[in-house]
Image (cartoon, rainbow, N blue to C red):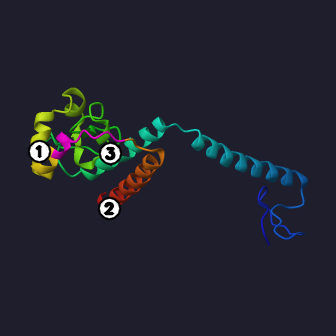
Amino acid sequence: MPKCKVCKTKFEPRFFLQKTCVNPSCLAEWIKLEREKKQKVADAKTKQRLKTKSEYNKEAQVAINKYVRIRDSKKLCVSCDSVLSVEYGGTTDCGHYRSRGSASHLRFNLFNMAAQCSRCNRYLSGNVVEYRKELIKRIGLDRVEKIEQDNQPRNFTIEYLARIKQIFNKKARFYEKKFR
């Protein structure tokens, strides 16, 4: 015997796929709950449809920054060799060798990004000289010079930004499970 979706009492269904008992108040409550579910789905779709490119950009940046912090959690700060903390709201940032302000076309380039202590990233403006030295050790002089010479503007589409968010959220979850 099925249970009523509202009052949870067992009942004998009169109709195929009947969800509630014969009590009219249960039926009315169930209809109200179904309408609210449909409205939530419609609201979520509308919110997604009305999102601006800037919002997609922010979400993609948050996802890739989280991934880089987790990826580099076992390493030291790229600039000052201090121990990094991966806890949320901790002392670790995702630093960019060429800043997002001066080279926004490199904001999603993983070779341009590394985990950095918040002191170096925020208060020492990235501590770029030390960052470059360590970056050469990590990825090689060729790649560092390519990053420095790359001035090709890029226009990121909404589809690309949504894909970046999806990929790096998935990678971050994988790394969290594997390394914690």
State which mark lies toward you, 3 or 1: 3
Using the numbered discs, state the Cα–Cα distance from disc 3 to disc 2 in whole angstroms: 23 Å
Give the labeled residue for mark 1: 134
Give the labeled residue for mark 2: 178
Q: Which residues are magenta?
A: 146-154
Residue 94 position, x and y percent, is 28, 41
Which residue is nearer to you in this view: 78 or 151? 151
Q: The disc labelled 3 sits on which kind of residue?
A: Phe
Which residue is nearer to you in this view: 96 or 82? 96
Q: Quadrant of the N terminus?
A: bottom right
State which mark lies toward you, 3 or 2: 3
**Quadrant of the rendered image containing residue 47:** top right
Could you tell whether 91 is left or right of 21 in the image? left
Q: Earlier in the sequence, mark 1 or mark 2?
A: 1
Question: Which structural element holds mark 3?
Answer: loop
When the figure is inspected, residue 157 is found, relative to residue 23, above or below; the finding is: above
Give the labeled residue for mark 3: 108
Question: Which structural element holds mark 2?
Answer: helix
Q: Quadrant of the C terminus?
A: bottom left
Residue 31 position, x and y percent, is 81, 52
**Residue 101 colored in magenta in the image:** no
Q: Residue at x 40, y 43 (%)?
A: 156
When the figure is inspected, residue 112 is found, relative to residue 3, above or below; the finding is: above
